[in-house]
Amino acid sequence: MKIIVDAMGGDNAPLEIIKGAMLALDEFDEIDEIIFTGDEDKINESVKENGIKLKKSRIVNCTQEISMCDEPASALKEKPDSSMAVGFKLLSEGEGDAFVSAGNTGAITVGATLIIKRIKGIKRPAIASLIPGDKKPFLLLDCGANSDCRAEFLYQFGYMGSLYMKNIMKCENPTVALANNGSEDTKGNALVKEAFELMKGAPYNFIGSIEGRQIPFGDADVVVADGFSGNLILKTYEGAAKVLMEALENAFNKNILSKLSYLGVKSSLDDMKTQFDYREYGGAVLLGIKKPVIKSHGSADAKTFKNAIKQAVWFLQTDLIEKTEEEIKSMQS
């Protein structure tokens, strides 16, 4: 198993990316090699300055970088020797088995679609994020790949999300819901109403609409939305979780009594922090693409990036792409 890593993507590259990759090698024996794409001098300098010992890895030198501000549609074309473009090229040529980047989301989506290509029969790929919930994580898609969607796209998102939860998370007969402004069948805009009618006859376990306040309670294993709405849900969810955690810390740091009280509940609070820590899942997967492409958080630290690589390992261990291809083919026949 060879994992291609964009060493220059993200706010904390290349140091946290390198550290995360080394953590992944320590944790996953299945990984035979990490292939870093990026500025070789910067990577080696970071390794030397921080006393990191590279193992089971090699560097493919690149002379360009794609920033978060670059226009996604043209970035890869204008910067063919960027760490991201080279990473996609290596993946398409079979030099590696999966690609992981914390870089520009739009550019990753464009690169995966144009260079790696969609699974036959898939109308649009979707960015799918595992999100911690009340009792168990749920999958939200699309989280930003397609701001404008058609009903048939949402229908397929539900199918891909269901397959992910069934094969990766071992969720038997996962429930699929459509993000809406109410749970009633009559609610929603034109897109949601049309998608609802399609999804009612889907071969997956569609349970209807779900409104925003119910999403965190895990009423559905898969929550489907267009990319614009899904991204808003994701970012709001992450922000609210961060505000809550900081408020709890401030409450327990008010005075001596509150600090003493904290000692009594520290174990439970630590468990809660772990449960709602987005870093545990590392990032998002791009579903509907012929090879595993993982988008880690732009602000990823070593732990976050290590867990993004874990998503790639899961993909390869379960042959999810092959299973998706088979399911889509059977659905169309």
Image (tube, rainbow, N blue to C red):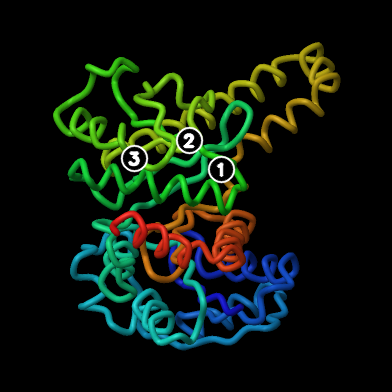
For disc 3, the marked residue is 202
- Name the kind of residue labelled 2 in the image: Glu
Task: Find residue 268 and report its horizontal and vertical position in percent.
Answer: 77, 25
For disc 1, the marked residue is 278
Quarter of the image containing the N terminus? bottom right
Residue under the image location 53 percent in, 28 percent down: 218
Quarter of the image containing the C terminus? bottom left
Residue under the image location 71 percent in, 19 percent down: 252
Secondary structure under tag 2 reads: helix
- Report how far apart the C-alphas of labels 3 and 2 lie in the structure: 30 Å
- The disc, 1 or 2, on the residue closer to the chain's N-terminal end is 2
The residue nearer to you, when weighing 76 against 89, is: 89
Q: Residue 238 carries which label?
A: 2
Secondary structure under tag 1 reads: helix
- The disc, 3 or 2, on the residue closer to the chain's N-terminal end is 3
- Report how far apart the C-alphas of labels 1 and 2 lie in the structure: 7 Å
**Residue 141 position (above or below residue 287):** above
- Name the kind of residue labelled 3 in the image: Ala
Task: Find residue 196 and report its horizontal and vertical position in percent.
Answer: 26, 30
The residue nearer to you, when weighing 262 against 201, is: 201
Q: Do the residues labelled 1 and 2 touch (CB within 8 Å)?
A: yes
**Residue 142 position (above or below residue 254):** below
